[in-house]
Image: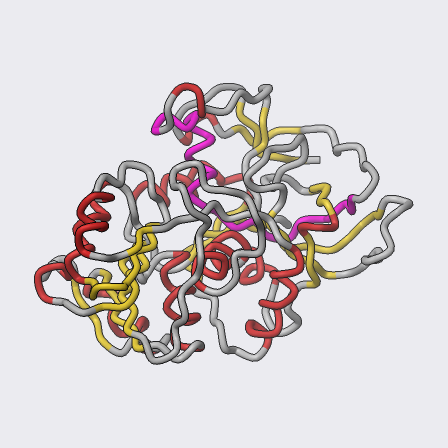
């Protein structure tokens, strides 16, 4: 098969389009003929060797490696013990995240554990389905249903989603992959949503349901907004603490990328909760989400698409930033 492999850590230039062996099918797996692949930040983090992590957390992977988790395609083969799916089923998945396996997404064929797999929504194509899994599961597990019992090692308590009905939710980075899904989930659950993004994204974010909009290039949300119930910071990182002052006592800040956050003492003083979790593969949750996607309750926005052979260009597009929705690779 053709795949994008890398033989060393580095920038987009290390992504090589080349022949690779079709992985052997194991028990509990199906082989998917991939039609489209969704890109996510962990793709470029792993490509680069997760340099932002402490050395003891950096992955030790056997080169060559294939990146990626999010796929949509058609089942070509099933292991003898698999009863849940059959050859010809159209499916989508986030494959093995946050663990790593020998069969990953940037390839013509991927072996997927059935626990990670769900039937593809019928009313969207493979391009849009591949854009869904990691970003929408992240928003879902942070905001609606955690779906696992794995402890976040960066905090002492289990992450707990907060009720959204009647609440005011501010979403920073509302124009990105996780952000545009978080906005729609919050509206679906009855929240008032304030979207923070660049001005060029205002029109379509309002179309997705944003009640108010803040152009971060003109105003800082933390300077003008108060008494928020929940902040979803889809950007996260060291600057996430600036949103603490926007929250009412009893409110919560959920940084999607919590590394670098240093405002725990301030949060305790203000009486607000700061919590995060690690998204994990969950086929059962993707099956739930299929109905929301089929009904148009959740819409998928595509920033750009590239052929699999042009994965380097897709990663270069990601590095430019200001992504509107998701970047997707297509497989002919």
Q: Is residue 64 found left or right of 22 in the rendered image?
A: left
Relative to 254, residue 55 above or below: above
Instruction: Specify the quadrant of the image occupied by residue 125.
Output: bottom right
Q: Is residue 286 found left or right of 159 in the rendered image?
A: right
Q: Is residue 237 found left or right of 314 in the rendered image?
A: left
**Furthest residue toward right:** 80
| Point 15% across, 58% down: residue | 245
| Point 35% across, 57% down: residue | 176
Taking the magenta stretch, the answer to whether it contains residue 295 is no
Relative to 71, residue 143 above or below: below
The scheme the figure's colours follow is secondary structure
Residue 32 in view: yes
Q: Assign the N terminus to one quadrant of the image.
A: top right
Q: Position of residue 73 (x, y in %)?
A: 68, 55
Q: Position of residue 188 (x, y in %)?
A: 44, 77
The span picked out in magenta is 29-52
Of 105 and 189, nearer the camera is 189
| Point 30% across, 50% down: residue | 235
Q: Is residue 17 found left or right of 154 in the rendered image?
A: right
Q: Where is residue 236 in the image (x, y as percent from the top left)?
A: 29, 47
| Point 28% across, 52% down: residue | 322
Q: Where is residue 218 in the image (x, y as percent from the top left)?
A: 9, 61
Of 190 and 87, nearer the camera is 190
Residue 218 in view: no
């Amino acid at each position: 098969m053709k795949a994008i492999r890398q033989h060393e850590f580095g920038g987009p230039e290390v992504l090589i389009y080349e022949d690779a062996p079709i992985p052997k099918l194991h028990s509990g797996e199906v082989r998917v003929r991939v039609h489209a692949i969704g890109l996510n930040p962990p793709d470029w983090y792993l490509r680069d060797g997760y340099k932002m992590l402490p050395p003891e957390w950096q992955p030790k992977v056997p080169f060559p490696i294939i990146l990626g988790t999010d796929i949509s395609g058609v089942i070509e083969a099933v292991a003898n013990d698999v009863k849940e799916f059959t050859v010809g089923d159209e499916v989508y998945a986030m494959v093995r995240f946050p663990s790593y396996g020998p069969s990953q997404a940037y390839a013509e064929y991927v072996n997927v554990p059935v626990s990670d797999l769900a039937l593809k929504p019928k009313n969207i194509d493979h391009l849009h389905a591949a854009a869904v899994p990691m970003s929408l599961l992240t928003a879902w597990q942070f905001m609606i249903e955690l779906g696992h019992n794995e402890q976040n090692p960066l905090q002492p308590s289990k992450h707990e989603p907060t009720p959204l009905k009647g609440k005011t939710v501010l979403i920073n980075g509302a124009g990105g992959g996780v952000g545009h899904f978080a906005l729609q989930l919050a509206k679906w659950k009855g929240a008032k949503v304030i979207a923070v993004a660049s001005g060029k994204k205002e029109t379509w974010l309002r179309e997705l349901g944003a009640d108010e909009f803040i152009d971060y290039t003109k105003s800082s949300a933390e300077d003008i907004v108060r008494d928020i119930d929940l902040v979803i910071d889809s950007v996260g990182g060291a600057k996430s603490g600036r949103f603490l002052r926007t929250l009412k006592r009893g409110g919560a800040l959920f940084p999607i990328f919590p590394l670098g956050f240093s405002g725990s003492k301030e949060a305790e003083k203000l009486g607000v909760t700061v919590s995060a979790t690690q998204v994990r593969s969950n086929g059962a949750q993707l099956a739930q989400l299929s109905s929301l996607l089929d009904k148009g309750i959740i819409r998928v926005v595509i920033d750009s698409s590239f052929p699999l052979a042009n994965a380097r260009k897709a990663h270069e597009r990601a590095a430019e930033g200001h992504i509107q929705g998701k970047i997707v690779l297509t497989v002919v």
